[in-house]
Amino acid sequence: MRRTLLTLLGSIILTSGTVVAGEKTHWEYTGDSGPKNWGTLDEKFKACATGRNQSPIDLNNFIEADLKTIDFNYTTQATEILNNGHTIQANYAPGSKIKVDGIDFELKQFHFHTPSENHIEGQSFPMEAHLVHADSDGNLAVIAIMFSEGENNAAIGKLWSSMPEHAGDKQSLKGKVSAIDLLPKDHDYYRFNGSLTTPPCTEGVRWLVMKNPVNVSKEQVKTFSDIMHHANNRPIQGTFARPVLK
C-alpha cells in the first residue's frame, strides 16, 4: 500500500493536480473521454464510477465538530508553474507543511479549477484552488480555497504573469509566491473524506475546505479559462453516508 501511494504521489507531482495513469490513458473534461466515462476508460479508473467516497461534493447538512486548528508552516515558495492541459499548477519547494491529526503533511503543489469543483450549500464559485499535501507514507490532504468575484488577487496576479499558454509547457516563476498568500485570513474550515477529483479518483483523501472565500477578479478568472479553453471541474458526486464536519 505504501508503495502504491508513493507511486501515485509521484504522478501528482510530475503531471499536475490531475493524475494520469502513466499518461497512457487519455481523459478529458468533455466528450467521450469526459467525467461520465472516466470509470470505463481504464481498469485503474474504476473508482471514478464505483467509489462511494468521491470528490467533489456539495457541502451541506453539516455536523458540528471540534475541528482542531490547522497548523500552517509554509516556509518555502512556489518554484515553477506548468500547464498540463488539464490545469495550471505551481510546484512547491520542499519544507512547507501543515499538521492535521497530529501528522505532518508536506505541501507538494497547488492548482486551480474553474468553476469550482466543490459547492458549499448549493453555491458554486468562479474558481477553486487545491493545495495538495502528502505525509511520509503518501497519504494525501487537500486544502480547498474558494474564490469569489471581486478585486484583483495579488497572488493570482503573480502566478498568471508566468502562466504557460500551451499544454506541456512550464517555466520558473518570475516572482516569489507563497501558498499562505492564497489563504483567507480566517482559517476555519469544513472537513470530509473524499478522493482525487481526476482519474484514477483514488479515495482516502482528507479534504479541508476553507469556509471563507477570497477575492479574484472577473478578468483573472477569464485569463485562466481562456488558457484552458474549457471548464475543468468534475461534476458534483454523491455524498452518501459521509459526514461533513464544521
Image (cartoon, rainbow, N blue to C red):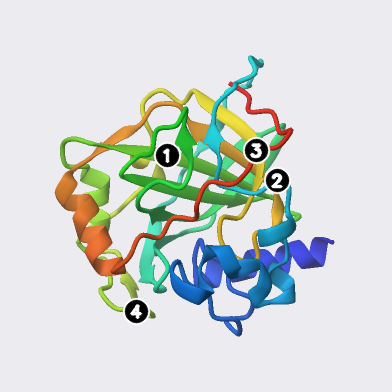
Which of discs 1 and 4 lies nearer the camera? The answer is 1
The quarter of the picture where the C terminus appears is: top right
Mark 4 Cα-neighbour bin, 10 Å: few <14, some 14–19, many ≥20? few
Mark 3: which secondary structure? loop
Name which of mark 2 and mark 1 comes first in the sequence.
2
Do tag 3 and tag 4 residues touch (Cβ < 8 Å)? Answer: no
Left or right relative to 167: residue 67: right
Left or right relative to 133: residue 101: right
Do tag 2 and tag 1 residues touch (Cβ < 8 Å)? Answer: no
Q: Is residue 22 visible?
A: yes
Mark 2: which secondary structure? loop
Task: Return the residue at label 1.
Answer: 145
Mark 4: which secondary structure? loop
Question: Among all residues in the image, which is located at the extreme bottom?
Answer: 24
* Distance of label 2 from label 1 (alpha carbons): 20 Å
In the drawing, what numbered circle is on residue 53?
2
Q: Amino acid at mark 1?
A: Ile
In the drawing, what numbered circle is on residue 169?
4
The residue located at (52%, 27%) in the rendering is 189
Name which of mark 3 and mark 1 comes first in the sequence.
1
Left or right relative to 184: residue 162: left
Observer-nearest of 220 and 236 = 236
Name which of mark 3 and mark 4 comes first in the sequence.
4
Q: x, y percentage for residue 55?
A: 59, 48
Q: Amino acid at mark 3?
A: Thr
Which of discs 3 and 2 lies nearer the camera? The answer is 3
Where is 116 relative to 88, above or below? above
Q: Amino acid at mark 2?
A: Asn
The residue located at (70%, 37%) in the rendering is 240
The residue located at (73%, 53%) in the rendering is 51
Name which of mark 3 and mark 2 comes first in the sequence.
2
In the drawing, what numbered circle is on residue 239?
3
